[in-house]
Image (spheres, rainbow, N blue to C red):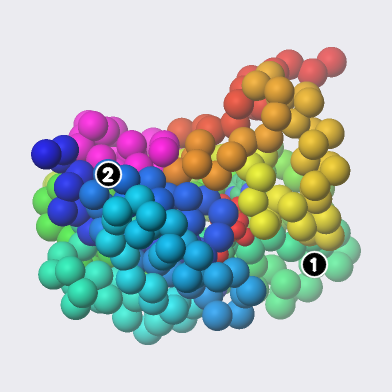
Amino acid sequence: MTSSEKRVAVITGAASGIGRALAVHYARQGVRSVIGTFPGDPHDPEETLRLVKDANGQAVIQEVDVRTTASVDHFAQRAVDEYGRLDYAVANAGILRNSPLGEMTDERWHDMLNVDLTGVLRTLRAGAARMTEGGALVAVSSIAGGVYGWEEHAHYAAAKAGVLGLIRSVAVELGPRGIRANAVIPGLIETPQSLDPVNSLGPEGLQRAGKDIPWGRAGRPEEVASVIAFLTSDEAMYITGQSLIVDGGLTIKMRA
Ligand code: NAD
C-alpha cells in the first residue's frame, strides 16, 4: 500500500487540461478525486471521469465556480460528504485573457484576479478548513508573472505572481497544523488554454515556441500533473512554501 492510497483530493478546473491529467494521475495512485467542472466552459467532465475509471480510480463530478465563496465551499465539502475526508486541494482553475494596458479597464482587471488569484485563495481556504495533519495544498501559477512579464497580459501575470506570495504565506500559517502549501509554475503546456489563438499562442505559436525550448517541445498536461501529485504526496513531506518550475528548461535558456 502506498502512502497516497485512500487519500481524497479536490481539483478545480478538472474537466480539461492539467486538472484532468491530475485526476487521472491520482486515480492510478488510488487517490480519489472530486472533479471540479465549470459549467460556463464547454469541457466535458464525463470524459475526465471515464479516464479515471479506465485507470481503476474513483471520482465524482462537482460543479464549481471559483468566483463565488459559497460555490467553492460547497465543492470542498463534497469531498467530505462523499468520501468522509479531504487530504489535498489543488487550485488549478484559471482563465487567460489578452488585454493591452490601455484597454485594461478595472472590470477586466477584477474579472481576471477574481478567478486567477482570489479563486485560488477561496480554494485553499475551503480546502484547509476541512483538512487535518498531513493535508496538502497546491496552486498553479505560471512562468507569466511567476518568472517573466508578458505583454498584454498584465492582469494574468499579476495574479500568477500573487499566487506565489499567497502560497508562501499560507505555508507559514498552516505549517504548525501539519498542512503544506506549494505552487507549480508551468511553462508552455499544450492544453485548451494555450491552444487558444486569441488569448494565448494557439497551435502554431505553441509549435514554434516549442522549438526554442531546450526540451524541444511544449509540455504535456501529464508532465505538470505528476509534479503536483508529488508535491501533495508524503514523498514531499518536508517541502512547503515552494514554487517548482515545470517548463522543459524554457526559463533557464539564455537568449542573446
Ligand atoms: P484549461 O483551460 O484546460 O484549464 C483551466 C480550467 O479552469 C478549465 O477547465 C476551466 O473550465 C476552469 N475554469 C475557468 N474559469 C473557472 C471558474 N470561474 N471556476 C472554476 N473553474 C474555472 O487550461 P490549463 O492549461 O489546463 O490550465 C490549468 C492552469 O494552468 C491554469 O491556472 C492556467 O493558468 C495554468 N497554466 C497553464 C499554462 C499552459 O501553457 N497551458 C501555463 C502556465 C499556467
Q: Is 54 left, or right, of 180 in this rendering?
A: right
| Residue 11 shows up from this direction | yes
Question: Along the polypeptide, which appears first: circle 1 or circle 2?
Answer: 2
**Nearer the observer, 55 or 68:** 55
Answer yes or no: do the residues labelled 1 and 2 have beta carbons within 8 Å?
no
Per the image, is 232 magenta? yes
Amino acid type shown at disc 2: Gln
Q: Badge 2 is on which residue?
A: 29
Task: Identify the magenta region.
Answer: 226-243
Location of residue 84 (image quadrant): bottom left
Structural crowding at the residue carrying mark 2, measured as other residues with C-alpha within 10 Å and reported as few (<14), some (14–19) or many (≥20) = many
Per the image, is 230 magenta? yes
Which residue occupies 68% across, 56% down? 193
Which residue occupies 38% across, 55% down? 54
Structural crowding at the residue carrying mark 1, measured as other residues with C-alpha within 10 Å and reported as few (<14), some (14–19) or many (≥20) = some
**Nearer the observer, 182 or 217:** 217
